[in-house]
Image: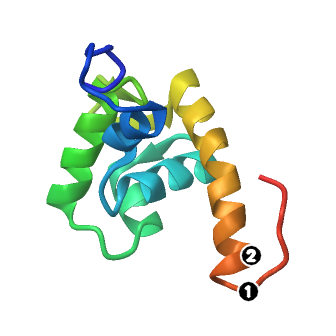
Amino acid sequence: MATVPRPGAYVCGIDAAMDVIGGKWKVLILWALDEHGSCRFGELRRQVPGITEKVLAAHLRELETDGIVHREAYDEVPPRVEYTLTEVGRHLNAALGPLGAWGREHVLGGAPHPA
């Protein structure tokens, strides 16, 4: 759980942040939740093409444990569960904005855009 300090576990802040967002899919999940607000599981799966249900479920659990994503389960039939970014998740996503701008400029060849 990366949002709980672990003395001596990290070399620097980037190391700690990578513990939270590491892996191929977590940043894309954050982007989808930021773009679309509250999303149900199936909606998220469509917003992140190529991710499997198993991996999405695991990453959502990890992001929830780390305080990045909030999971709201509604007492309805059929059951409904929605995911949103927490305040910490919104701050993390904002911090990733400059990285996305760098990718657009240097990898995709587009003009830099504000985060």
Looking at numbered disc 2 in the image, what kind of residue is underneath it? Glu
Q: CA distance from mark 2 to mark 1?
A: 5 Å
Residue 96 on image: x %, y %: 60, 48
- Colour convention: rainbow
Of residue 82 and residue 25, the one placed in the foreground of this image is: 25
Residue position for label 1: 109
Outermost residue on the left side: it is 54
Query: Which residue bears the numbered disc 2?
Result: 105
**In the depicted structure, whether residue 17 falls above or below residue 113:** above
Q: Nearer the viewer, residue 103 or 9?
A: 9
x, y percent for residue 112: 83, 69
Quadrant assignment for the N terminus:
top left
Q: What percent of the width, then of the height, locates residue 115? A: 77, 52
Q: Nearer the viewer, residue 87 or 5?
A: 5
Q: Does any portion of residue 39 appear in the rendered image?
A: yes
The outermost residue toward the bottom is 109
Q: Does residue 113 appear to the left or right of 97 in the view shown?
A: right
